[in-house]
Amino acid sequence: MLSCAWAPIGFMPDEADCLKAFQSMARILRPQGILILTALPTDRQWKEKPRFILKSSRHDFSRIFVVDYLAEKACYNILDVLHDGEMSDLKVWSAELRVLLRDDQERLLLKAGFRAVDFYGSFDFSPYDRESSSSLISVAHR
């Protein structure tokens, strides 16, 4: 099994490089192996294009995405707020990611040599729904 957060794939300059990465992953997996991808954005997010997304909020840490939507990419400006009782610290960084929605992922993963791809809307294995899911988790079967 391989697991990959979307960011490394999202930094690929074009679909051809994404396909090469998926082909490489398929080659190193054993037969019956699986690749698990978590992706940004979801079909819902790309359609609605929210500017601000509260990604995480705990007593000691909050993460906020401020998103700029471009033609085929999304720039995530990430604000990490570290809460330390009396004081907070703010860290800011950005990542521009290529957008490959559910159908794009399926097409490229199958072309890369995976035999099937399942999609989930959360880590509890609920089905992916383009209109309502806030997570896009792909499980590609070799």
Image (cartoon, grey):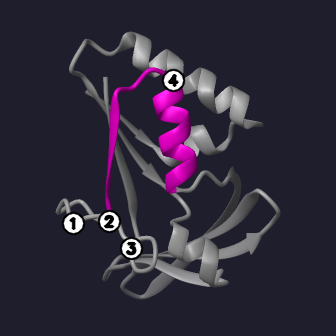
Could you say where residue 77 lies in the image, as x and y percent from the top left? 69, 68
Label 4 and label 3: CA atoms lie apart by: 26 Å
Q: Residue 121 carries which label?
A: 2
Do the numbered discs 3 and 1 sit on residues whose CB atoms are within 8 Å?
A: yes
Residue at (39, 26) in percent of width and height? 114
Residue at (62, 77) in percent of width and height? 47
Q: Which three-letter amino acid code belongs to the residue tagged 2?
A: Gly
In the orientation shown, which residue stands out farthest toward the right? 71
Is disc 2 placed on a helix, strand or loop?
loop
Q: Mark 1 points at which residue?
A: 126
Q: Name the residue under label 3.
A: 133
Is disc 3 placed on a helix, strand or loop?
loop
Is disc 1 placed on a helix, strand or loop?
loop
Do the numbered discs 2 and 1 sit on residues whose CB atoms are within 8 Å?
A: yes
Do the numbered discs 3 and 2 sit on residues whose CB atoms are within 8 Å?
A: yes
Mark nearest the camera among 4 and 3 is 4
